[in-house]
Image (cartoon, coloured by chain):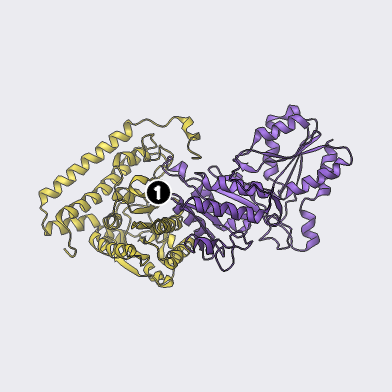
Chain colours: A yellow, B purple
Amino acid sequence: MTTNLTKEKLVEMYRKMIQIRSFEEKLFELYSQNLVPGTIHLYAGEEAVAVGVCSSLRKEDYITSTHRGHGHCIAKGADLKRTMAEILGKKTGYCKGKGGSMHIADFSIGMLGATAVVGAGLPIAVGAGLSVKLRKTDQIVACFFGEGASNQGTFHESLNMASIWKLPVIFVCENNLYAMGTRQSIAMNIENIADRAAAYGIPGVSVDGNDVLAVYEEACKASERARRGEGPTLIECKTYRHRGHSRVDPARYRSKEEVAEWLSKDPIKRFRDKLLRSAVVEGEIQAVEKEVSLQIEEALHFAMESPYPQPGEALEDVYA
Amino acid sequence: MRKVTYRDALREALREEMQRDMSVFLLGEDIGKYWGGAFKVTDGLAQEFGEERVRDTPISESAIVGTAVGAAITGMHPVAEIMFGDLTALAMDQIANQAAKIRYMFGAQAKCPMVVRTPFGAGVNIASHHSQSLEAWFMHVPGLYVAVPSTPFDAKGLLKTAIRGDNPVLFCEHKLLYPVEGEVPQDEYAVPFGLADVKREGSDVTVVATLFMVYKALSAAKELEKDGINVEVVDPRTLTPLDRHGIIRSVKKTGRIVIVTEDCRTAGVSAEIAAVVAEEALDYLDAPVKRVAEPDTPIPFSPPLEQYVIPDEKSIVKAVKEVV
């Protein structure tokens, strides 16, 4: 192990990662049975990013999320039942069925919500950072977005603003190589999004986004820097989504070889192997896996059994 | 009662709310100590409250409003200034998709108490990118309130209500109104949203007008008085919520309505008010609804061109005479 982590913390990180994976695989299964309304953007394959980053945060810290946000929620500590219920459009979901897969939020754990407009979460994260600074707490903000969002004007506006005001924000770019079907090389003239940090005079680092401990280490450095009042960091996590962009996407724009190569770098398998080579024994890991599998079944049961909202509830909560 | 300009009345509201509540802060381009706001509304506030709470920003409209959103949902009460109303287009996603929807789409977990102040309106020869009246855009966004104060009294009272509320507010000012003086009490007060104000009582025709058009309507009313036509001028003061009852009450009394707004006619503020009257008060009308609005063009630069498109007293007088 490169990092000085307790066995409990390592196991907890593994638990979160397989919670996300199992949750997403269960959703995919439900999809095939037409049990999920609308669309979903699965996080499977990118678990090391959300878990690596959120493991460096405290409960009172904030995150902002994206259309591919289930993993961020779970990593920050969201309840699986209410997350699943929201995705199925049930009244017991986090947003009472008004948000769905692309708009889950849990303000009680600092999860400030997922916005489905690409790049729109960045200025909101800056605002949360400014709020922290003005309220003089020692919270920090982790802002998740994809490499596609780094081409939006909001990326530039937000990193610039956070840098001049030295706000406690970690900008976490999940570079999964494709913005829908558009390969990174078609949309930008650079290979490392982290290089863009230089334009704002802030640290930028590219990290293996399929190595949860590597992500965790960089996130810790950025968190400490943010808490010290030294300003934002841009962390680019190179990763890959195991499935297509959304429900209908078979991802034919990716070669079989490329997919196979990335599947062989599966972040969960890698972390599992690493754990087995350290102090954790097979039996302990299997116990966690079994426990998570039960949690997913429970979440599914809860969501399936929950009622839909009454149609008239569509008119509620437009204003406070 | 003492007289105060619209500009000073706005500044008083900002100052008093900042004194009252530490979570209120201002952000925007050139609002701080070097400029005091393009229209000087925030002049002196940075010196008084410091640069942390009266914050100059880069030219980044989207991030200005987005930052306000992020701050609002985490316990602050930001008041953002967008230097010209036309530039709200640059921040439209943060206003319409984020600020206005955050409460609803997250199932009422969050509140987004924030104000975006911005000046609309033509008349100072600054052409197509600095002169539009875009209030109607924001009336089409559920989750957002839209305030349109015409007097210093309303400006101060509505801004206080906007800042104290729990919802995002698009606070529309008018650049010709900043130097206009009016009575403003020394004592504490606020003007509630959704309550129209009768700026002039009359019995023959209701003229609904907003922002700078209120003054043109009042001056047209004076003119019409000479012909024995008694005009009632109703100012909705907020477009969302819209005081439908207040407008209809007046129409029931006069049986006639002319709607005067500075935005362009098609799908504009006047169209919505006309629809409300058509749906809810048709039986009380003795004449068709009339609208006086800008033609459907961008705002041109050259003074004769610009004056041609802005509704004036003459067109209001003409419209009123057509319905009586």
Is residue B148 visible in the rendered image? The answer is no
Does residue B292 lie above or below A132 as drawn?
above
Viewer-side residue, B285 vs A305:
B285
Count of numbered circles in the view: 1
SS at mark 1 in the image: strand
**Residue that appears at 40% across and 69% down:** A197
Label 1 crowd (10 A; few <14 / some 14-19 / many >=20): many
The image quadrant of residue B232 is: top right
Which residue was labeled with disc 1? A113
Q: Position of residue A223 (x, y in %)?
A: 31, 62
**Residue that appears at 62% across and 62% down:** B40
Does residue B96 lie above or below A198 as drawn?
above
Viewer-side residue, B263 vs A139:
A139
Which image quadrant: the N terminus of chain A? Answer: bottom left
Q: Position of residue B14 (x, y in %)?
A: 56, 53
Viewer-side residue, B211 vs A19:
B211
Identity of the amino acid at label 1? Gly
Q: Is residue B131 left or right of residue A58?
A: right
Q: Position of residue B219 (x, y in %)?
A: 80, 47
The image quadrant of residue A124 is: bottom left
Viewer-side residue, A259 vs B321:
B321
**Residue that appears at 24% across and 59% down:** A212
Q: Residue furthest top?
A: B283
The image quadrant of residue A118 is: bottom left
Badge 1: chain ID = A
Q: Position of residue B270 (x, y in %)?
A: 70, 43
Q: Is residue B307 left or right of residue A147?
A: right
Is residue B214 visible in the rendered image? The answer is yes
